[in-house]
Structures are given as C-alpha cells and as structure tokens.
Image (spheres, grey):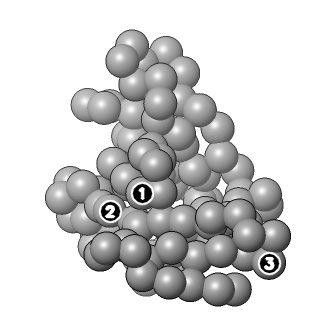
Amino acid sequence: MLSKTVGEEQVHKGISGRIIMKNIRIHPKALKEFRELPSGTKKKVKDALQAIAEGSERSLDIAKTRGKKGKEDMMRLRVGDHRIIFKIDRRTLWMIRIADRSKVYKDL
C-alpha cells in the first residue's frame, strides 16, 4: 500500500491505484458512547472502522438507514448487538452514533 500526505490529509492507494480512505471523525456523542463500551466491543468497533477506511468492508454488515427523512446519506454498521451510524463525505468517515441496537435510532 502506498501512502502520501496531501495537505493535512493522508491518502492511501492500494495496488490498483484506487484511493482507499479516509480520515475517521467521531461526533462527541459517539465518542462518549464509544468510551462506555466494554473493551472487547471497542476492539471490534475499531477493527470494523479500520476495515472500512482500508476499503475492505466486504465482510461487514453495512446497510443504508431507512425511514429517517433527511438522513438518507447515513449508513449503519452492525457489530454484535451494537450499531454504528456513520456517513462518508469524500474521503472522511463520520461516526455519528454507536449504541445498542434497541437504542441507536432514537434521537437520530
């Protein structure tokens, strides 16, 4: 994998030359929710986000969110009983929420 710095952003290219990603930005509420997770779940979340950032998300359970007006660009990632709500803007992954599946869609 090749990498170079462009401005403040690091861009990675795979062997095919495709730009892989991305900065990962975390909303303050999501950061608070992340800190409250058990350590095993934290590792799984970090690994899943890293897989998305590296462009190897094929094995992950990712789907678009449905039924939320004005939130059509958001995605959800399933990690065990937890869901991560995120969106991708250019080469930045924005983590918006992370919570138990029964609570994550409330107040979205």
Using the rendered image of the protein, determine whether residue 101 is visible from the camera's viewpoint. no
- Residue bearing the label numbered 2: 25
The image shows residue 83 at horizontal and vertical percentages of: 50, 50
Q: Nearer the viewer, residue 36 or 95?
A: 95
Compute the Cα span from label 2 to label 1. 7 Å
Judged from this view, the residue extending furthest toward the left is 28
Q: Residue at the location (62% across, 66% down)?
A: 20
Type of amino acid at the residue the image marks with label 1: Thr
The image shows residue 2 at horizontal and vertical percentages of: 64, 86
Q: Is residue 50 above or below residue 79?
A: below
- Residue bearing the label numbered 1: 92
Q: Are marks 2 and 1 in contact (CB under 8 Å)?
A: yes
Q: Secondary structure beneath disc 3?
A: loop
Using the rendered image of the protein, determine whether residue 61 is visible from the camera's viewpoint. yes
Left or right: where 45 falls relative to 71: right
Compute the Cα span from label 3 to label 1. 21 Å
